[in-house]
Each structure stands twice: as structure tokens, then as C-alpha cells.
Image (cartoon, rainbow, N blue to C red):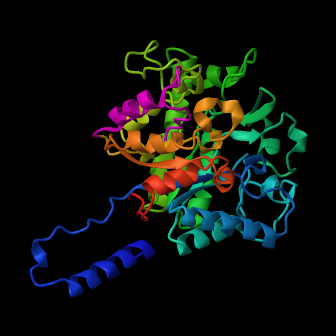
């Protein structure tokens, strides 16, 4: 029994002992329903953790537990910890090198095991640890010689596609799909993570004037499909289905969740889509049929990144949340809403995000939809800064008591 539930049990028992004989007819205080209250902790480019490469193991550890303590302070109950940011690892992986964001040199041993420690310290604080993986991103640059000499992308250059100034594994190659699963599932086999978590990157976001060159793979494997787009969606569908099955086999009880870009398709493109006018649609641009994954219950939870304010013309939070609730209704796939905490107090994001109450209003609105089982905030650095007090307002308005995460 975890900390929160044990405390609730103790308080309930004491209340029963102290109650007068006729108290049975009085209404009882109900235990709050399980609710996801998550926090993303991004390691890519040292965004959230560690604050810079080259810190000592002790300094990295101190920063990590400070983030976990901050999550506990704000009565959150889960962290989505990025452990494979660019085809590398925050644990001693036999498949991929140590992440450069630890030591400044890809492959450099940091002298400790961050993922093992994060799982232990999160669980000690009553937090879930969702291991966050990026499946296909190899590097945020386009120079293979900058990768560690032992990097699989250097041993298999035919796996790699340069695009938009970055390097990606080719999702159209079956051997790539098998490899990235092996690399990610190694962490699940080693550590009692509560979930495997994917972000929004599948095929890369479009870059104007650039072509993702997968002609050879399409010529070899795409013959049975109506067009290249259908073949690419099939490749991502296979990744999702196979990963889900392997997670269940590797560590039963561990969940599999995905946090996609918040718009599947605009209604002007597809009548099943949302009342939005977004420039990116995951189905068409990232070849990720996120609606299907939810409707057919391929994944345990979906956490769409609804990173817009209420009333935003192109993608209104107040329109997207009901759309996602309808998609999730009756499926068995849990719906959590990804929240853009990073926008709060940023002058570049417009007037709505200067209002400390904007995020709190998101939770109030979402509460009208029973399919919404919680929220996840991007990201840790922004929660610590809390520039205009938006997170403090959320806690004061909605998180006065702890809550268990949904299971």
C-alpha cells in the first residue's frame, strides 16, 4: 500500500473509531477518484535535466531528486522521464551509447545509472515513473561523424535518413523497427517502470522544401499499398502494435502510452476530425493514425498535446478536449490532456498566456468530460520557474489533496 493510500486508510480508521453510534447515517467523505497528475522531464538538449552536460554524478543526482521533490510538493503523482532522447540511453544499454547530455560526450560513462535511480527515487516518493522514449530521432544535427564510433547509426548508415538538418532512423525498414524496440525494451526488462511513454515524433515534422528520402525502402516494401502515405502509416501502426505486445510480454502490468500532437485531422480534411485549422495533422504529416490507436485500444493511454489556450482560433482548447473525449469514450484507452505550462508567462505566446488562471481554467473545462482522467505538464523547468504563478494557481484550485494515478 502506497503512502497516499496508507494515510487515507489510517484517517478513515480513526474517523470510524471516533464516530458516535448514530454516525452511520451521516455522509462519508469519499476518497478522490484516481487522477493523472504528470510532469514531463526532458533530457534532450539539457532542457530540464541535467541542467548542463558534464555535471558530476552527485550534482546530477541532486538536480534529479529536486525535480521529484518539486512534483511531490505540487501534489503530482507521475513523472515522464526522457531516457532515450536521440537514439542513446540514460542507462547502461547494450544497444546504444550513453547520452551526450550527461557528460557532453556521447558514449561517456556518467559514473551512475540515472534511470535506475530515477525509478527508485520516484517510487520512494509515491510517484510513478513513465520511461519516455523517442523511437526514431538519431541526432539534432546532420553529421554522422559526430556520433559515437560505436553508434548503431554509424555501423548501419543505410538505416539513417538526413532530413531538415537532423538524422533519423528510417521507419520503413523492418530491421530498424525491430532494433529500436529491442533498445527501448531493454530498459523495461531491467527496471520496474510504470509505463513506456512515446512523444509526438514518428516520421519527422514537415520541413518546407525538404523531402524525406525513403524511396529505396518504399520500392522494396511498399508495393501492396495504395500510396506512400498509406505505407508510412502502416509502418508506424506496426511500431505501436508490436511495442504494445512486447511491453506486455516483457513486464506484465507496465502500461504503454503515447503523447501525440493535439490535432489528428482537421474537420475540413476529414469529417471525423476536430473543428480546428491546424497547420500540422498527425495523420497526414507524421503518418501517425492516433485516433485509430485510441479507438481500437492499441495503447493504454493517450495524452494529446493540447498546447493552445481557450479561444485560440486555429486550435481551441475548448473544442479539442471534447473531441478527444469523444474519441476515447468507450474504448478502454485512458485520456490525459497534455498542458503547455511552458507557455505561461512567455510574452511571445500572446495575452492569454499572461493570465495566471489560464491553465486552471483548462482543468475546470476538462472536468466536464468524464473521459478526461488527468493532465500532464510540459515541463519540469517551467514548473520550477512558474513565471506568473500558473502552476501555483492549478495547485490551489484543483490539487489541494493528493490523488492516486489511474491504473
Q: Which quarter of the rendering shows the N terminus?
A: bottom left
Q: Which quarter of the rendering shows the C terminus?
A: bottom left
Q: Residue at x 21, y 69 (%)?
A: 28
User: Picture coordinates of residue 26 (x, y %)?
Assistant: 14, 71
Q: Residue at x 49, y 26 (%)?
A: 311
User: Picture coordinates of residue 296 (x, y %)?
Assistant: 35, 37
Q: Residue at x 48, y 22 (%)?
A: 265
Quadrant assignment, res 155: top right
| Residue 118 in view here | yes
Whether the magenta-drawn stretch holds residue 306 is answered as yes
- Give the residue at the far right of this rendering: 145
Indicate whether 85 appears above or below 127: above
Quadrant assignment, res 323: top left
| Residue 247 in view here | no
| Left or right position of 358 against 118 | left
- Give the residue at the far top of this rendering: 268
Indicate whether 245 appears above or below 15: above
Q: Residue at x 43, y 47 (%)?
A: 301
Foreground pick, 393 / 13 = 393
Quadrant assignment, res 209: top right
- Give the residue at the far bottom of this rendering: 17
User: Picture coordinates of residue 234 (x, y %)?
Assistant: 51, 29
| Range drawn in magenta | 302-330
Amino acid at each position: 500500500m502506497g503512502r497516499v493510500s496508507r494515510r487515507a486508510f489510517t484517517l478513515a480508521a480513526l474517523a470510524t473509531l471516533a464516530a458516535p453510534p448514530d454516525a452511520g447515517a451521516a455522509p462519508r467523505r469519499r476518497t478522490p477518484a484516481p487522477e493523472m497528475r504528470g510532469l514531463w522531464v526532458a533530457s534532450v538538449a539539457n532542457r530540464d535535466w541535467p541542467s548542463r552536460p558534464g555535471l558530476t554524478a552527485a550534482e546530477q543526482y541532486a538536480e534529479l531528486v529536486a525535480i521529484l521533490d518539486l512534483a511531490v510538493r505540487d501534489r503530482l503523482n507521475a513523472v515522464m522521464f526522457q531516457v532515450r532522447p536521440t537514439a542513446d540511453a540514460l542507462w547502461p544499454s547494450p544497444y546504444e551509447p550513453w547520452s551526450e547530455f550527461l557528460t557532453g560526450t556521447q558514449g561517456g560513462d556518467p559514473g551512475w545509472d540515472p534511470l535506475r535511480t530515477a525509478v527508485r527515487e520516484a517510487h520512494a516518493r509515491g510517484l510513478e515513473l513513465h520511461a519516455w522514449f523517442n523511437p526514431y530521432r538519431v541526432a539534432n544535427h546532420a553529421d554522422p561523424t559526430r556520433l559515437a564510433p560505436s553508434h548503431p547509426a554509424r555501423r548501419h548508415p543505410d538505416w539513417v535518413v538526413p532530413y531538415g538538418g537532423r538524422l533519423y532512423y528510417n521507419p520503413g525498414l523492418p530491421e530498424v523497427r525491430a532494433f529500436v524496440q529491442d533498445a527501448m525494451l531493454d530498459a523495461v526488462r531491467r527496471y520496474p517502470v510504470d509505463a513506456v511513454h512515446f512523444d509526438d515524433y514518428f516520421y519527422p515534422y514537415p520541413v518546407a522544401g525538404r523531402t524525406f528520402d525513403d524511396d529505396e525502402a518504399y520500392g522494396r516494401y511498399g508495393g501492396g499499398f495504395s500510396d506512400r502515405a498509406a505505407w508510412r502509416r502502416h509502418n508506424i501502426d506496426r511500431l505501436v502494435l508490436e511495442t504494445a505486445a512486447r511491453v506486455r510480454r516483457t513486464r506484465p502490468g507496465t502500461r504503454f502510452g503515447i503523447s501525440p500532437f493535439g490535432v489528428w485531422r482537421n474537420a475540413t480534411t476529414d469529417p471525423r476530425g476536430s473543428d480546428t485549422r491546424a497547420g500540422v495533422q498527425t495523420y497526414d504529416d507524421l503518418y501517425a493514425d492516433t485516433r485509430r490507436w485510441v479507438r481500437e485500444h492499441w495503447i493504454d493511454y493517450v495524452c494529446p498535446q493540447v498546447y493552445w489556450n481557450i479561444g485560440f482560433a486555429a486550435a481551441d482548447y475548448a473544442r479539442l478536449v471534447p473531441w478527444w473525449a469523444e474519441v476515447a469514450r468507450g474504448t478502454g484507452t485512458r485520456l490525459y490532456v497534455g498542458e503547455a505550462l511552458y507557455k505561461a508567462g512567455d510574452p511571445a505566446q500572446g495575452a492569454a498566456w499572461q493570465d495566471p488562471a489560464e491553465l486552471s481554467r483548462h482543468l475546470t473545462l476538462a472536468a466536464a468530460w468524464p473521459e478526461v482522467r488527468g493532465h500532464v505538464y510540459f515541463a519540469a523547468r517551467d514548473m520550477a520557474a512558474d513565471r506568473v504563478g500558473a502552476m501555483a494557481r492549478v495547485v490551489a484550485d484543483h490539487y489541494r489533496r493528493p490523488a492516486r494515478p489511474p491504473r
